[in-house]
Image (cartoon, rainbow, N blue to C red):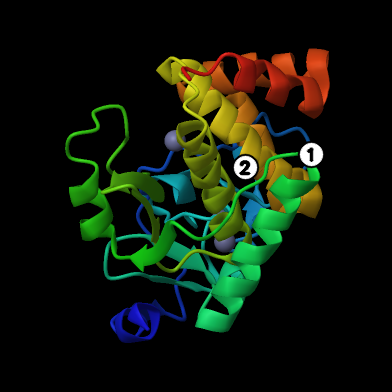
Amino acid sequence: MIIYKVIYNIRTYENIKIMKIINFYIIFFSIIFCKVEMNCDICKLAIKDNYYKDPWGNKYHSYHKKDGFFCNTCSRIISVRTTGGGFQFNDGRYMCKLCQTSIIKTDKEQSKSINSVIKLLNEKGIDIALNGIDISIVDKKTLQESIIHLSNHNEETIKGITILNNGKYEINILWGLTELEFKSVLAHELLHVWIDYNNIRLNEEKLEGFCNLGSAIVYKYYNNQLAKILLQSMENNNDPIYGKGYRYMRSMLEIHGWESLISILLNNNQN
Ligand SMILES: [Zn+2]
Ligand SMILES: [Zn+2]
Ligand SMILES: [Zn+2]
């Protein structure tokens, strides 16, 4: 319900051409030295100098980047030609029109997504019972307030959090996420629940790295272009906790496989 209420406050930019760049960690693009003449995917004028190329293959003049807005979900530069426009959420995030079509809007879509994540984790041998877990969709401010005492989370980019409240797990997930984002965030948070429920003690790097394996399960299952880009971004993340931790746990998984990795973790619990 929250989604409906807030979505009406969204400022729409149907005819966005170039918007302001925002600070978001998954944005990546490469600058390429121009050898052959080609046209810009934003303004259609010839590119005669160095240009940028996003992970989707969109090529654009380097001067568009300075004033451009990028989709918080897929990292595409938002423009009429590259994305059919886009919009800004009232909390500052931007989303392109292409991603907008897969936003989770209804309770039914949400519970379908929750069940499919539970199933995906289950297939790897991670059993999670939903009773005892409250999953809520919250606005950015609420999410940011809930992480005030958790110093390692980036307030700007956080999309989900798990809180233990009187023996109950509360998972808060940012509203307005697409199905893929929602599922990858949820898989990460559900692994936090699984770790805590089984009294497994890991240092922060291994903990967040393990939980990112949950997101990787979702990305690999979808395996579409966006999922590949998001997986790559997680693999390249130079954050000492989320990036290094993920690469460490991914190598553990490659060595042991899911069954043994789960046994190792369960045998190292604090019971
Ligand atoms: Zn251009
Ligand atoms: Zn997008
Ligand atoms: Zn986490």
Using the numbered discs, state the Cα–Cα distance from disc 2 to disc 1 in whole angstroms. 39 Å
Q: Is residue 229 left or right of residue 147?
A: right
User: Tag 1, which secondary structure?
Assistant: loop
Q: Residue at x 41, y 50 (%)?
A: 159
Q: Where, by quadrant of the figure, is residue 216 drawn?
A: top right
* Amino acid type for the residue under numbered disc 2: Ser
Compared with residue 130, is residue 127 higher up or lower down, i.e. above or below?
above
Q: Is residue 147 left or right of residue 65?
A: left
How packed is label 1: few (under 14 Cα within 10 Å), some, or many (20 or more)? few
Q: Is residue 109 visible?
A: yes
Residue labelled with disc 2: 215
Q: Residue at x 37, y 84 (%)?
A: 1
- Residue 36 lies, in percent from the top left, at 79, 39
- Residue 160 lies, in percent from the top left, at 41, 50
Query: Which numbered tag is attached to residue 36?
Result: 1
State the residue in front, 48 or 149. 149
Q: Where, by quadrant of the figure, is residue 265 drawn?
A: top right
Label 2 beta carbon within 8 A of ligand 3: no
